[in-house]
Amino acid sequence: MAVGAVALAGPGNALATVNWGPGGAEVKTGSVPFGGAMDAGGNIYTANYGSSSVTRVTPAGIPSGSAGNGYSWGTPLPGPWGPCKAAVDSSGKVYVVTTGGNQDPSTPEDEGSVMRFTPDGNWTVNWGPAGAAVLIPPGSCGITVDQAGNVYTTDGNSDSVTKITPGGVVTTGWANTGDEPGAITVDASGNLYTANAVGTTYTDNGVGGSVTKISSSGVSSGNAGNGYRWAGVGSGPTAIAVDSSGNVFTTNQNSNTVTRITPSGVSSGSVSDGYRWFSGGGSNPLSVATDSTGSVYVGYHGTDDAWKVTPSGTPTRLGATGDNPFWIGVDSFGNAFTINGASNVSKFANVPSSPTPPAPTPSDPTPTDPTPSSPAPVDDPPAQPKSPAKPIGAWPATVRDGKVAALIEPAAGVRYSISATNGKRSRAGACRNVKVKEGRNKVTRVSCSVALPRGTWRVSIIPTLNGVPGTPISRTYRVR
């Protein structure tokens, strides 16, 4: 649900909008932006699985590229790379996990890779020794980078972490984790934390997830017998963040909770309440971030809104996001941002709570930040191409034979794609025209289907018209 400016009363309030670009333009990205990252200057990078592109959005709200090339930053990607998640190092290099390998016939189709972008947008996957491709195991999606420039990815198939040095040397199985690691983060001391989808039968009777802590030398907490567990979290952890004091936070989509873990590994709540530190903000929380004050920001994929929680646990609703937020972040000015499944970026402008400013009127200018490092252009951007309408269709009530198949009423000139995510992995399906019987007549419909393994999946059907993605329709399924 896209929104205009919405004033929310109270301390920590915000102005929420997707139209924060020059001249009030909507800030667009490529389609199906599963992941994102923010650099020290406030630039946002989105990993667009649907359009196989990476978008850069400046602090002034100017996206790279155009609708025709998936808002690509730098040279557009040549094939279906499947960008999944992103991370930025201290020098401004951007690293993107892809699920499409090296686009080389000699590379297995399901091989993953890590692309590296320089700060000016030049990218390569061949940044290993002697120009070798930096390939990682299939099933990898989570990514983070430490202060030394080492990159780490999670391997959900082998329950481990892969380490990649600044020179592109890849070590698979570098450290052990709990079952099905997804999100990963790193603290200022170089300790890593992974959010694992499955807890252990020894501790939580198989209910809930867990976090593994890994030292900078690759030593994991716990042992194989307890699933390398450092702390318990709610069911279905999808995102993880650490604050400057060493507190770790996870969003747990199945239990609809946020878990807080102290630096000593003590979790909030208990297994019976989903290790709850905060709940009630909405459903299906998929993203979490922290700021310099220790406040926590949560994006709710199911209810399309964002919340801020102070270190003492006081929550404030920031406002509505675009449809289905996948990522949330906060800049040095306290402005929060979400990357949304509607292929846009929402901004929640930080408004000082003391003194409280008057509510803006329609004629008031949008509050501005201090001058960003990158200058804004003087010309307004060109008019945006027309987006297709949101699809009209029928979802199945349940998953049958491990597959979800939906029927869509086709619109002229519109193409449809279907994909699914469980917050750490993604699956792509296919759409095709079919004839179905309605009464005495046969009519044309679009059948979109995707095969799903066990777990909880958010399935989306995305319309595209002349290269411009529209608002998807989505539904969550649980495969047992």
Image (tube, rainbow, N blue to C red):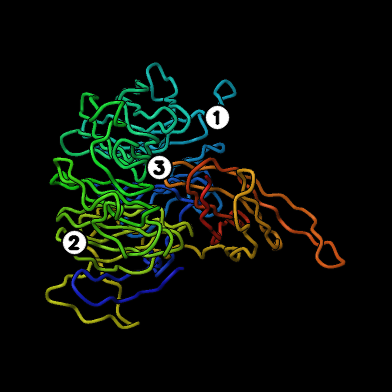
Q: Looking at the image, which residue is at 25% across and 62% down?
A: 308
Label 1 to label 3: alpha-carbon separation: 18 Å
Foreground residue among 442 and 381? 442
Q: Nearer the viewer, residue 367 or 138?
A: 138
Question: How far apart, in angstroms, are the residues tagged by discs 1 and 2?
Answer: 46 Å
Residue 193 place in picture, x, y as percent: 26, 37
- For the residues labelled 3 and 2, the Cα–Cα distance comes to 29 Å
Q: Earlier in the sequence, mark 1 or mark 2?
A: 1
Where residue 326 sits in the image (x, y, percent)? 41, 53
- Vertical arrangement, residue 167 with respect to residue 70, above or below: above
Query: Tag 3's secondary structure?
Result: strand
Among numbered discs 1 and 3, the one appearing first in the sequence? 3
- Tag 1: residue type? Gln
Judging by the rendered image, the residue that carries numbered circle 1 is 103
Q: Which residue is mark 3?
A: 85
Amino acid type shown at disc 2: Gly
* Mark 2 neighbour density, 10 Å: few (under 14) some (14–19) many (20 or more): few
Q: Estimate the x, y position of residue 394 in percent, counting from the top left.
A: 65, 62
Q: Is residue 36 visible?
A: no
Foreground mark, 1 or 3, reads 3
Q: Image quarter for residue 194?
A: top left
Q: Residue 258 occupies which quadrant of the picture?
A: bottom left
Q: Which residue is mark 2?
A: 313
Single out the mark in the foreground, 1 or 2: 2
Tell me which label, 3 or 2, sits earlier in the chain: 3
Q: Is residue 475 above or below residue 267?
A: below
* Label pair 3/2, CB-CB below 8 angstroms: no
Nearest the eye: 122 or 143: 143
**Mark 1–mark 2 CB contact (< 8 Å):** no
